[in-house]
Image (spheres, rainbow, N blue to C red):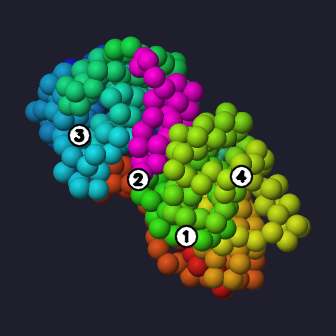
Amino acid sequence: MAQLILMPDKERSALKRHPWLFAGSVGRLVGRARAGDTVEVLADDGRPLGRAAYSPQSQIRARFWTFDAAETVDDAFFKRRIATAVARRAALPELAGQEGLRLVHAESDGLPGVIADRYGDTVVVQLTSAGADKWRSAIVAGLVKATGCDRVYERSDSDVRGLEGLAPTTGWIHGTAPSVPLSIGENGVRLGVDIAGGHKTGFYLDQRENRRLLAELAGEKEVLNCFCYTGGFSLQALAGGAASVLSIDSSGPALAQARANLALNPHLPGVRAEWLEADVFQALRDFRKEGRQFDLIVLDPPKFAPSAAHADRASRAYKDINLLGCRLLRPGGLLMTYSCSGGIGLELFQKIVAGAALDAGRDARIVRRLAGSADHPVALNFPEGEYLKGLLVQVD
Ligand code: SAH
């Protein structure tokens, strides 16, 4: 096995068990290693730090598989790690029985570059790093073993693969396509999931708990759901007894799936739902001119800032929609607002929302802080895992 020797005094983050080694902290490679190969990581003084996957093309030059320098990274390693990740979910009562569930959350489950989501009896896997890509068949075998699922679909088409020099790869890698369209039950609502063409692995499982909260809050309210995608929040608002739910998205296919999802739920009062294909920035401005008002507004936009480098522009976009959102709320109304940008921290996000309320001339207070569901845990040694943050704000 090749050895990756760190620069002098660059072992601190590894000693704190942070799984990434940036190019700037790597001194030299002793021996030969290709993309995805496992290398032994050593401090400059020769102290062994663990074993990592080598990514010669990426700024994240290596990702630790293990901080135990004696642990072998082989098929059995992946079987163990995946079984542990699945067991973690099974041990949390709130996740028991969920048909849609994230089984493996990458670094936070000790498996950098590996995402696995379960939709009924189908697992969708996304491999985003050279190391994860290399161990594809061990990972698939581990998922099949740990879940008993006999279908695994690969959705390795995320942009970040490009940074690793990996081409997109998609398709069935275990079993065959189910004969009926895939759907999951979530808090009493049925949702179709397009694993081949949808976002991420097909659905935003990370918002499950927040959608449930919306159902609790929506009773009798006029709800506006911005960036609705396939209607997850919209349907929960209807289930919670909303007076009306207006949902906006710029994607025609997402709205088509949202309408189909509503049709899957004949118990919901579909006449109270309205779908609008539009740019949210424009639509909110138009509503303002028309003097429209709402009791509860959800803002769950796409990632405006994939990294800290985009933070400035993204901040303006978040400010803009939150400002418009505050203006469209009736007194006492609720703003449920999110950022899933890794490049925008919680503190900055709160500042942006505060600035938005101030500019809207509205006093407002945080009544709840919101985060991703429990199947998207954040490892304490990997704070970067906390990408989704949200605030429930009550506006005077
Ligand atoms: N809340 C959803 C997930 C939202 S994902 C859920 O719980 O499932 C973000 C959505 O924003 C995507 O569906 C995308 O099509 C949409 N989108 C991106 N930019 C937009 C814009 N400017 N106006 C309207 N929709 C937009």
Can residue 158 be seen from the camera position used here? Answer: no
Contact between labelled residues 3 and 2, with CB atoms less than 8 Å apart: no
- The residue carrying mark 4 is 274
Please state which of the two labelled residues, at mark 4 or mark 3, is closer to the viewer: 4
Q: Earlier in the sequence, mark 2 or mark 3?
A: 3
- Which secondary structure lies at badge 1? loop
**In the displayed structure image, the side of residue 53 where residue 385 appears, left or right:** right
Q: Which mark is residue 219?
A: 1
Q: Earlier in the sequence, mark 3 or mark 1?
A: 3
- Disc 2 or disc 3, which is closer to the eye? 2
Across and down, in percent, residue 27 comes to 35, 35
For the N terminus, the quadrant is: top left
Vertical relation: 168 (above or below) 12:
above
- Is 193 within the magenta? yes
Spatial distance from mark 2 to mark 3, Cα to Cα? Answer: 21 Å
* Residue 86 disc label: 3
User: Which residue corresponds to the image point at 80% horizontal and 56% vertical from the top-left?
Assistant: 283
Q: Is mark 3 within 8 Å of ligand 1?
A: no
Image coordinates for residue 82, horizontal then vertical, percent: 23, 34
Say which residue appears at 71% left-offset and 70% top-offset. 294
Magenta span dominant secondary structure: loop
Residue range corresponding to the magenta coloring? 177-205
Q: What residue would you read off at disc 2? A: 187
Q: Earlier in the sequence, mark 1 or mark 2?
A: 2
Cβ atoms under marks 3 and 1 closer than 8 Å:
no
Residue drawn at (23%, 40%), measured in percent from left and top?
Answer: 86
| Residue type for callout 3 | Val
**Mark closest to the chain's N terminus, 1 or 4:** 1
Q: Is residue 128 left or right of residue 299?
A: left
Mark 3 neighbour density, 10 Å: few (under 14) some (14–19) many (20 or more): some
